[in-house]
Each structure stands twice: as C-alpha cells, then as structure tokens.
Image (tube, grey):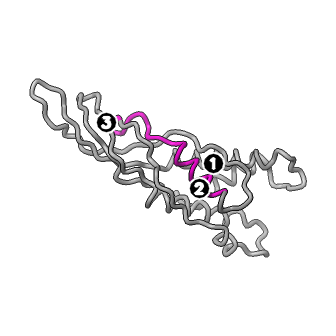
Amino acid sequence: MSKTAFAQTIISKLKATIGTDGGSYTSGSALSAMAAVAQGITEYLIANTTVTITYAGIVSATVPYPDPIIADTFKIVGTCTPPSLANSFDSWIKQIETNIITGFQLAPSGNVGVVFAQKPFLNVGIKTMQENLKSVHDVSDKDPQLKVWEVICGGIMDWINSVALNSIAGPASRPTAPSVGTASITKITIT
C-alpha cells in the first residue's frame, strides 16, 4: 500500500458521503466530510499499521525462567474521531494528529500472544502544512484531490513511521506461557 492507496481510501469515503457536486452541499456537508475523512483514516490505519514490541517476561513455573518470546507484533484498534471544523489547514491537521494519538491502542494480543495494553502513538510531529498543499496544486487540474490527499496522507505516514511511537515501557504478559513482565514499542510501520 502507499500514500496513494491511503488517499484513495479517504477520497472514496468522501465521495460516498458528500459526492462531488458542490451545488448539492448543505450546511451539514462539512461535518459529514470530517466524519468521512476520520472513517478513511481509521480504516487505513487499522488495515496497514504494524507495531513491533520487545518483551521481557518471566515464566511462572516451579523454577521461574525467562520467557523465550522476546518480541511480538501487533495490529492497532480504535477510531480516529472526526476533527471539528477548523479555520486553517494547520490547525485541522493538528486535530487529526491529536485524534490519532488518542484514538488508537494496541490490539488485545500480539501475533505470538503477548498482551500489552498500550497506546501506540505519543509524540506529535506531522510536518505537513498548507504551503505543502499549495505547492502541488495546479489550477489546470480537473480533479486535484488525489495529489492534495497524497501530501496529507504522506505526512501522516511519515510521522507514524518516524517519531509518533510511544516508547514508554509498561506491564505486559503472555498468558499462554504463562509469563509476566514488561514490554515497549520499538517500531511502528504503516505501509
């Protein structure tokens, strides 16, 4: 997948919700559009984000021993809340960032059974600003949506793939061992 697929996901949600005929928009269209954008972000992030963690656990046994599982990968669950209407793109994208940080957590269990109740995103850092959108827009474009949404989606992906991750360690377990210990996120990848 890519920033193009991410952008196409959002555009398809927008088209299904408010269409493309500005003449038919109503006073509620802007709020409906924000809900569609949030739905597209949620769908794409859940389907395409992988979180890698390290795990250090001790297996409960007559003689306790270190859990041989030292890493796991998780999907994310949650929802990006729709942003409210904003006066500027820069404040709007910051709302999107905040809503992603607060709206998602790790899935209940990783691929090899580690349980780590953690928010995957913590650090702000989406660098996309309105000037970035203006630089790709060409007035001769019949439909500039894809180019503009690619910039927005690319900025979100760059942030998630770099500084967004929450590296704070926390309690974790692997019930099937059974073991308990601590885990921390080492990498988040959105493709």
Q: Which residue does the image show at 53% across and 44% down from the upper left?
A: 102
Q: Which residue does the image show at 9% across and 28% down from the upper left?
A: 63
Q: Image quarter for residue 4?
A: bottom right
Which callout, 1 or 3, points to the residue nearer the camera? 3
Q: Helix, strand or loop at disc 2? A: helix
| Label 3 crowd bin: few (<14), some (14–19), many (20+), radius 10 Å | many
Name the spot of residue 2 as percent of width and height, x first.
53, 60
Q: Is residue 67 magenta?
A: no
Q: As rendered, which of 20 and 163 lies closer to the eye?
A: 163
Name the spot of residue 177 as percent of width and height, x first.
23, 29
Residue on which the image places disc 3: 172
Is residue 8 shown left or right of residue 163?
right
Q: Which residue does the image show at 13% across and 30% down from the upper left?
A: 64
**Badge number at residue 40:** 1
Q: Helix, strand or loop at disc 3? A: strand
Alpha-carbon span between mark 1 and mark 3 = 31 Å
- Dot 3 amino acid type: Ala
**Badge number at residue 6:** 2
Name the spot of residue 26 as percent of width and height, x first.
87, 47
